[in-house]
Amino acid sequence: MQASTSAANASHGEHLLSLYRTMARIRAFENAAEEASRGSVAAFGATIDAAALVRGPLHLSTGQEAVAAGVCANLARTDYLTSTHRGHGHTLAKGADAMAMMCELFGRAAGTNKGKGGSMHIADFAVGMLGANGVVAAGIPIAVGAAHSAKIRGSDAIVACFFGDGAINRGPFLEGLNWAKIFELRVLFVCEDNRYSATTATDAMTAGEGAAARARGIGLPARTVDGNDVLAVDAAARDLVARLRAGAGPQFLHGLTYRVKGHVSVDAAAYRDQGEVANALESDPLKVAAARLTALGVTAERIAAADAAARAEIEAAVAVARAAAVPEPAEAYADVQDTGAGLWR
Amino acid sequence: MALMNYAQAARSALADAMRADARVVALGEDVGHGGIFGQYRGLREEFGAARVIDTPISEATIMGAAVGMALTGLRPVVEMRVVDFALCAIDEIVNQAAKNRYMFGGQGRVPLVARLPIGLWSGSAAQHSQSLESWFAHVPGLVVVAPSTPADNYSLLASAIACGDPVIYMEHKELWGLDGEVAPGQSAPLGIARLARSGSDLTLVTWSNSVHIALDAAAQAAQQGVSVEVIDLRTIWPWDREAVLESAARTGRLLVVHEAVQAAGFGAEVAATVAEELGIPVGRLGAPRIPVGYARTLENVARISAQNLLQALKDLVTGKQRGRSMVQRENEVSRR
C-alpha cells in the first residue's frame, strides 16, 4: 500500500514537473520580453525609447501560465489552436520554438512570421497554432471554421479556442458558441479569465453570471476551475478533450486566473488596488505548483533545475534574436496577394 | 454556348466548381434553400447539406468561419446576401481574411470567395442598395470583382473560386434576371477588362450594372456623332490599368462612371491615374453623396441614367466639364 502510494505520487510528480517546465518556460519568455520592451510604446504615461528591442504593444501572460500549460498538455500537434493578443503562452505550450518566437518579437526575418506580425500576431501553423489576434474575440469564428472544416474533411483534429473574459461581451462569442453547438463541432472553448478588460475590471462590465453561465445558456457543458492550479486545469481539459474526441459536441472551460502585469508591458496598472495584486501573487501558478511538487516528493534541486533550464533556453533565444538580421525592406511587398502582385499604387 | 440568366450562370459556375473540387463548399443564410435570388437553387440536392451549409444570421461568424475553413484546406464560397450585411463582418473581412497571409508571414492562405451583392434594387432603400466596392479596393490583400453579364458571372466566379487570394465578389442585384449567352467551362482572368464597345472620341470606363447604362448612352452618343469606347473593368482590384491607359491615350479623353457615391469612389482612382499618366481631360460620374431613399423619386436621384451620362460625356468632349479655375473661385469668394 505504502509502495503503491509513493509510486503514484512519483508518477503525479513527474507529470506535474512536466507541466511546471512549460509554465517556467512561459514565465521566462514573458520576463525576457518585458525586459526587452521598455520604451516599446508611448502609452500609460510611458515614453518611447527608439532603442527598445520589442516595439509596439506587448501583452504579457505572466501569472496566467497554468491555463496555457494545462490545456495544451492535452492537445496533439495536429490539433488546432487560436489565441488572443496575449498569446505567447499558448504558442509556446502548443509547441512553437521559443527562439523563432523571440525573433518575431524582436522583428527579425527569422521570426515565426518573418517579422511581419510581432507579439500580437504570433503564430506557428506548423504546430497547429493558427494565430494570436489583435482583435478581442476574433479568434472565435476562426476556431469554429477550423473545426467545421475538420468535420467536413473527416479529420480527427480538435480546436482549442482561447479568449479572455473581455471577449464574452463581444458578438462573435455568442455567434461562435451557437455555431459550434448547432453543427456539433469539436471545439474546446477556453475562457482565460484574468479579470481585466484592458484597464477596466470585467465584472463591472458584465451582466449576469458570466462566462460559464452564458455558455450553458447556449447548451454547452461548462466547467469553471482555478486557473492558477495547473493540475486542476489539466484534469478538466483532459476530461473535456476526451468528451470532444468521443463526439460529445463543443465543450467550455472557464479558468479563473489573474493578470499580474498591466494591459501592456508599459502599463503599471496603477488603477487597481495593490492589495488585490499582492493577494493574487500568493496564488501564483508556479508557486502553487512548486509547493505541490515538494509535497509529491520532487526535490528542490529538480524544481530549481527546471527554472534554470527555462531561463537558459530563453536567454539563448534572446541572444539569437538580438543578433538576428532584420527583414529587407523589399519583404514588405511579399505575401500580400498573388492576384495583382506588383500593382502597389 | 447556353442561354442563362445572371443568377443561373453563377449557380452553374459554383456547381461546376463543386463537382470538380471536393474542397469547395458554400455557406451563408438560406443557401440550402436556393438563396433568395435563386443563385444556389438545387445545389443542396446535388451536394448535400454538409457542403451547402445553411447558417444562422451570424455574419461575423459566417465570414470568420470561412477564414478558418480556408486556412485548413477548404475553399469556401460565402454568401452575404447584400454588401450592406457584410458590414457586420467587416473585422473578419478586413482584419482577418485580408491580413492573415501577410501578418503571419505567409504561413497560410485564405482562398475564399465572399459574395457581396451590390446596387440599387427595387426600392430597397438605404441599407439594401449600396455599392461599396471602393471600400474593399482600398484594403491590401483583397481582390474585388464586379461582373456585368451572365457570361462574366460564370467565368469570373469560376476564376474567383480558383483564386488563392480572398476575393470580394460583387454581383449586382438588378442583373439577376438578365439573360445572355454563357460558355460553361470557361474562366476569365481576374484583372483583365473587357472591351464592351469600340470608339474613338472618348474612353468610358465603368463596371457592374452601369455597363448597360453606358452602352445605352454610347449608342445615343453615336447618333449624335460622338464615338465612345466602353470598357467594362470587371475586376476593380487589381484593375486593368494597361487597357484603360491604352484606350485613353488613343481617344484622348476619359470618363469613369459608377453607381457608387462619386466622392472617394473607385472612379477617382482611375481618373487620377489617367490624369497623372497621360495628362488628358478626365471626368467622373457617380451618385451624389446621399443615402439611397425609398420613394422612386428619391431613389432616382441616386441613379445614373443614360441621360445624365450622355450629358457628362458631351460636356467632356466639348470641354465644359473643366472645373472652375482657381481665379474664378477666388472671385466668387471675394464677392460674398
Image (cartoon, helix red, strand yellow):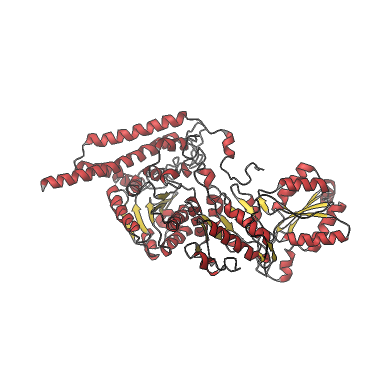
Q: Where is residue B164 in the image (x, y as percent from the top left)?
A: 56, 49
Report the residue at 46% width, 39% height from top.
Answer: A112
Q: In which quarter of the image is residue A304?
A: top left
Q: Position of residue B144 (x, y in %)?
A: 63, 53
Which one is in front, B328 or A173? A173
- State left or right for residue A224 relative to residue B174: left
A29 over B228 or under it: above or below: above
- State left or right for residue A243 relative to residue B267: left
Report the residue at 60% width, 68% height from top.
Answer: B38
B211 over B103 or under it: above or below: below
Q: Residue furthest front?
A: B1
- State left or right for residue B46 relative to residue B273: left
Q: Position of residue A303 (x, y in %)?
A: 25, 37
Is residue B180 visible to us here?
Answer: yes
Which one is in front, B9 or B184? B184
Q: Position of residue A76 (x, y in %)?
A: 35, 48
- State left or right for residue A329 relative to residue A137: right
Tell how many labels.
0
Q: Residue furthest bottom?
A: B295
Q: Quadrant of residue A204?
A: bottom left
Q: Residue furthest right?
A: B225
Rendered-image quadrant of the N terminus of chain B = bottom right
Is residue B77 visible to us here?
Answer: no
B204 over B249 or under it: above or below: below
Which one is in front, A285 or A149? A149
